[in-house]
Image: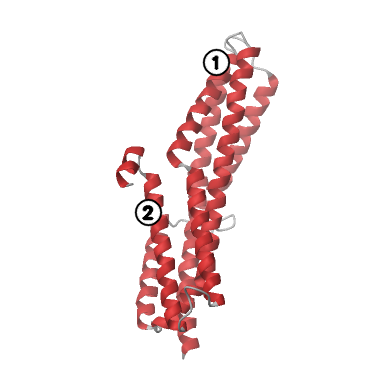
Amino acid sequence: MPNSRTNELIEYRRDVADLQRRIRNRRIQVLGLYGTPLMLISALISWIATKNLFWLGQDMPGSANVAFLAVSAILAAATALQFAVEFSNEFWEWEDEGKSVSQLRLDLELAEERRILEARRLTPSPVERQASYKERTPAEVERLRRESRHYRRVHLWMQWLLFFSSAGVTAITAWYDPPQPGKGVLIALGFTITVITAANGYFKPRERAFNLQQTADNIEQHVTALDLGIAPYVQEEAANLELFANNVENMRVEQRKREQQLDQPHQGQQEVI
């Protein structure tokens, strides 16, 4: 009976995970379906704008023409292929061809509702749920560390781009006296520096990475303490599992509070603190 109950819950979770995967895939398909034609139009407009901005009244260099032509041809071929796959039966079929993301989201909500109702009907005892919660904790630790690594990489890329852009402004200012092309490059680098500085101050990737890594380390410390039976987990198994679940949830709540503080403007953060 317990195995049958577990298998039923696993099947419902598998259905939910499959729908989540299909939603991700369909988003990518729709993004390509509508994004590629827009990129093609942008490439053609950029081609015309570059010709009028830098080579007005004269022939555009062959290398530039070839580059724009190659990009436009690739985007046109990708657009034609995606439209053919989406609207024609002569090619292979996408898994959710012709279905909108909103329809898949509705299917996901219904699947989640079925899973919740069945889980409520087949709910195990509190001790079993706490033991299951403990087994899921390593995945939560890995998720926190993965997000921490992501924000660290974002911060490092932003810093390196900021360094190179700042150095490029100085170098180009020293090398180029004519208005073009040095002036256009300086404008682009200055714009890049402004955007990166503003984004770094607003999104705070370094602080987010530090908070996520700290929470992951704290949760892992409690997992190790529970496995080894050391303080504060020196009671009966049921009491230890209850205390462990309570501690981990408190740490997750604190992590969410820190994330909310980072999302607030500086004035709001001072008021919260």
Percent across and percent down for residue 232 are 47, 73
Which label number is shown at residue 257?
A: 2
Which label number is shown at residue 104?
A: none
Tell me the quarter of the picture where residue 127 sits.
bottom left
Q: Is residue 240 visible?
A: yes
- Give the residue displayed 45% in from the left and 72% down from the top: 244
- What is the distance, in whole Å, between disc 1 and disc 2 at their CAs? 50 Å
- Between circles 1 and 2, the one closer to the viewer is 2
Q: Amino acid at mark 2?
A: Lys
- Give the residue displayed 66% in from the left and 23% down from the top: 64
Neighbours of disc 1 within 10 Å: few (<14), some (14-19), many (20+): few
Residue situated furthest left in the rendering? 271
- Give the residue displayed 46% in from the left and 56% down from the top: 98
Describe the element under mark 1 as helix, strand or loop: helix
Q: Amino acid at mark 1?
A: Leu
Percent across and percent down for residue 258 are 40, 51
Q: Which residue is mark 1?
A: 53
Percent across and percent down for residue 157 are 59, 39
Percent across and percent down for residue 177 are 61, 8
